[in-house]
Image (spheres, coloured by chain):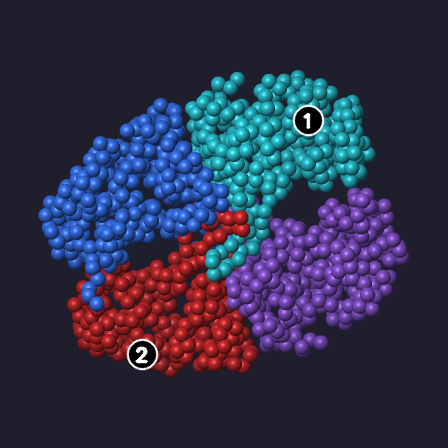
Chain colours: A red, B purple, C cyan, D blue
Amino acid sequence: MGKQKTLKIGIIGAGRIGKIHTDNLAMHIPQAEIAAIVDRDLKAAQQIASKYHVTSAYSDYQKILDDPKIDAVAIFTSTDTHADLIIAAARAGKHIFCEKPIDLTLDKVDKAIDAVKKAGIKCQIGFNQRFDPGIKRLMDLIKSGKIGELQILRITSRDPAPPPISFIKSSGGLFLDMTIHDFDMACHLSGSEALEVYAMGGVLVDPVIGKAGDIDTAIVTLRLASGAMATIDNSRKAVYGYDKRVEVFGSGGMAAIANNPANATTYHSPNGVLTDKPSYFFLERYADSYIAELSEFVKAVLFDKPTPLSAAESRKPVVIAMAANKSLRENRPVKISEIE
Amino acid sequence: MGKQKTLKIGIIGAGRIGKIHTDNLAMHIPQAEIAAIVDRDLKAAQQIASKYHVTSAYSDYQKILDDPKIDAVAIFTSTDTHADLIIAAARAGKHIFCEKPIDLTLDKVDKAIDAVKKAGIKCQIGFNQRFDPGIKRLMDLIKSGKIGELQILRITSRDPAPPPISFIKSSGGLFLDMTIHDFDMACHLSGSEALEVYAMGGVLVDPVIGKAGDIDTAIVTLRLASGAMATIDNSRKAVYGYDKRVEVFGSGGMAAIANNPANATTYHSPNGVLTDKPSYFFLERYADSYIAELSEFVKAVLFDKPTPLSAAESRKPVVIAMAANKSLRENRPVKISEIE
Amino acid sequence: MGKQKTLKIGIIGAGRIGKIHTDNLAMHIPQAEIAAIVDRDLKAAQQIASKYHVTSAYSDYQKILDDPKIDAVAIFTSTDTHADLIIAAARAGKHIFCEKPIDLTLDKVDKAIDAVKKAGIKCQIGFNQRFDPGIKRLMDLIKSGKIGELQILRITSRDPAPPPISFIKSSGGLFLDMTIHDFDMACHLSGSEALEVYAMGGVLVDPVIGKAGDIDTAIVTLRLASGAMATIDNSRKAVYGYDKRVEVFGSGGMAAIANNPANATTYHSPNGVLTDKPSYFFLERYADSYIAELSEFVKAVLFDKPTPLSAAESRKPVVIAMAANKSLRENRPVKISEIE
Amino acid sequence: MGKQKTLKIGIIGAGRIGKIHTDNLAMHIPQAEIAAIVDRDLKAAQQIASKYHVTSAYSDYQKILDDPKIDAVAIFTSTDTHADLIIAAARAGKHIFCEKPIDLTLDKVDKAIDAVKKAGIKCQIGFNQRFDPGIKRLMDLIKSGKIGELQILRITSRDPAPPPISFIKSSGGLFLDMTIHDFDMACHLSGSEALEVYAMGGVLVDPVIGKAGDIDTAIVTLRLASGAMATIDNSRKAVYGYDKRVEVFGSGGMAAIANNPANATTYHSPNGVLTDKPSYFFLERYADSYIAELSEFVKAVLFDKPTPLSAAESRKPVVIAMAANKSLRENRPVKISEIE
């Protein structure tokens, strides 16, 4: 029996999220082979390369694009570089995995999607939450018909604490940074498209966030093409831990994903029954999904199948987020078709 | 020791809900004494009177209003008669407990409130869900400061099955019939008032409901004067049973009321762990709250304290429902102040 | 249509448990008619009779036995009087519902069972826990074959607080007073009989209980004729509330009854998620089962069907409790056949 | 600042459990350095060495014992080789981590413990379940005093399916193979010692297990020196998945570890609410604990602190298991002191 085929990947970006993805590729995805690691900070690239016994570490990503032995690139840099890197990688004929979102402007998103299309390469954008085991189970229930015709989606996303103000300023705002996952989830679960959005928001957590031009609390309502409706509520600060719940309701039943306590122990005291709060944030909660999304990307390329989440599909939540921003500014429901 | 003082009550209306309230008054509220029972259908009045050993049964409510020994009336007739009965009872100097809502038009609501005010009697409207033990616990948490500043309210109300079309036609529609409880709950829990409402709705359950001029599925968003926001989702049909959940989220924590399974048994099978669905509808789920609201009314009158829910307060959810109807028709957020 | 047939019942014993049963008969079981109430304390009998509009109240139970219009007696007196009352009632040809247990000695138990047999009347002993909705659901699962062949039963019974020492002294001890319900449950759920019992016990809650000759904490293991085994753990004091859990494990699956929190509200705080402890004791927890057992008794007599729990069957848990006492004294497994 | 100190470990045994431990050491415990891997099957050793970039792979463990640069050995071979390897490693002055149990006979256990003592090296035996996050939380609650004086322990251990008969024959039987973890847990949680044990068992799962001289279902009761009592129930086959629950009950409260469903999704259908069963067995359920036990061993050696579970302590559950076997054979409670 011959050796199993592996996908040779060049990693661009060795920051926080890059390290996690690199660890997942190295340790959990046997069909992936890390061929090179690039970071503007060469030392950071070298350190992580050394940890995983990767022989090539560079500060210039062109080295990866020029290497004919490398099949694919994985882009883990900051959002403002995503589009240019996708375009360059596509032109170099590399398959692409890129962190979400492609860009905060539709113009650049479209140019990247166009480059991918022209190059005929495979491209997957990292909306990792789709790959959560709970969401997978939800999708199985939907696909099996057990939920029936989908009527109401209910999503709660509340972070344990706000990010630094510096991040908020460059993030594109709550809807483009945080709710974007929920918008993607609504499209994913419904298999439909958003038609119209109404966003109500406020600054209830920290006035500094308001001064930075953003909101920290929001309720967003979506009307989908299928007729289903969705309600999403967000907060930048839940003192009881990362609160992430998704519920689908339909003519056949309802399915819901709860938060998991940090451990399976309950304490029964004279004051009641206590379970530990989820002690983690998204990196812990979605640890499995980070592995799964890359694993599916690697398999899609190796076996020449469509990636589970294309570049074109990743455009939709960006558009919804933009419509939500417009709705918030103008205090009226905004049709998705207005954003084009 | 002298005999405990009791409140002598005349009951008007011996239909389905009247029977339940009568049973509660007779069996669970020792401080109440049923002095007379009235129903247009004299036989119905007599039957229930006989069951509870009440000596007076009439077909004409004026008999109750004329009886100087009767302290209070309890109105359990159809909604379209509430306002006139309140006005008549107030003029007769009787304290009043009346099923919700006072009326489907603001004009009649206001006349009834006015009559109550002028008469100086006590009046309580039957928004029973406020008296649910779970809601009581939620309020205790809010009042104790454990939720902190309230930021998001999330309410789900889904009935197990739609009412008859004949009822839907006279009900005032989803918002005035069903969501009205949720509007009242939002005001109750927040201790605030609604400023603005946006309603998205559709006919996803049964087209016959649409032909009757109503919707059967809705998502409503409220902005409250306190700055908090609320999202409510409704359906006329949840195949998995009556689904009624309330959640308050604030700077100090979150509290949520779940649905209870029909029993405490779980079945662990090769296919997973199964608990029984809630087998009941509102009469079963809110059995305790029906007793509690009447008990508090009786005590408020006996000990001359404010009723926990005045006629004036019961006007608010009616106005919100009207604003929601306007929002639905015009597809835009509607200010509560527009409805006056 | 003729009037529905009702069972005319004479109640003997108007103490705490008698009041509860009387309320259930009067208010929740329309096919029962309370014909007379007897208590040594005539005033107590009269008070409760007046409350439920019962015309006959006596201090002498013979009045009931002599009344040909009375079909059945319900015995709610102290345990030491049960056997004699059963014998007298059986001889008078009355059907009998009697609180558990018949007696603390086998001799008197057997005499009572014999009298019942000879009289050919129906007799049901009040092991109410069998009628709990959770237990009903468990039995349905067992009978449907979903648990398969029963292998392990696990029962936890922990009271919120010990009874008064005076009660403990006359109760027959932990096994005859408290565990007796669990012994009955093991027989009921397994449809089998105990063959052998091993009891480990201690005084861990209060040394005063030990001085009264009893234990307050125990673990009892049973071997059943079917091959299944049972483990029961008991404590007289669970500071977190009445803790009553039953679990059946078999070749086809497992079913378990959990404790229910006092309400459906959870509080999510920075310290974890809190639910309220069950605030009640057995009267509250088993409120439904008290109604159900009497309702089934009434129906069994009216429709001439076997009572769900015969006098003869109620002997078994008494014997097991005696064997458990012997096992505790001699620190060895004791065969049930040794107690005869 | 200089480089962080690491512990150089030689691994003996590259079978199933050896691979898991090796992966944990390589990937999750940065303070560990795998210096060599030994397996009788040299190819197996080489394969795993290559995967983790370990330069030395041997078929003879003496190579590890002779290597002065190696600080510690990790023994993952079959149980019958543990004692001899411990003795040899101790004599070679290596610290030792060894899978549980040391041996199935007390004689060899004692010789190994003696060798460890004489050599003055650190030795930890792999009772991994102590390191489960749920158990850690339980211990924290106990140590904090929140459980008060411990009175009852309740442990359920039910495997999803029996092991092969060949394994059962060499395993030492249910008590020495499976219940041994529960015996260790009872000692660990109570901080006490077993005084007496009563075991009831049977062959209810598969007669082939009975023919192999073992039982497959058991209930074991322990009396501890502290006065607390424990009940353990075991089955070789739970069709609903690996069922592992631990509960401690005391004067101050109760704490319990539940099974976790495979995912956080519930499906609400017309037939009830369904959660997925735990889909895993011990390797998945205790994945975290396998990492934690090795991590604590490495730190104990590096920082010269006592290992959390000494060789001497690991002897206790072996003795209890032997007493349980004697109790089963003789059908009587057996004092631990009888086994010496």
Left or right, B52 with reference to A246: right
How far across and down, in percent of the image, does residue B149 sit?
56, 68
Left or right, A133 with reference to C157: left
Secondary structure type for disc 1? strand
Task: Sort mark 2 into few (<14), some (14-19) or many (20+) by Cα contacts within 10 Å.
Answer: few
Callout 2 amino acid: Thr
- Name the residue beneath numbered marker 2: A81
- Name the residue beneath numbered marker 1: C96
Q: Nearer the viewer, residue C275 or C327?
A: C327
Residue at 59 percent across and 21 percent down: it is C105
| Quarter assignment of residue D173 | top left
Compared with residue C286, is residue A293 higher up or lower down, i.e. above or below?
below
How far across and down, in percent of the image, does residue B181 sit?
65, 62
User: Does residue D111 show up?
Assistant: yes
Residue at 30 percent across and 80 percent down: it is A84
Left or right, A205 with reference to A315: right
Q: Nearer the viewer, residue B59 or D283?
A: D283
Callout 1 amino acid: Ile
Question: Can you say which quadrant of the picture contains the C terminus of chain D?
Answer: top left
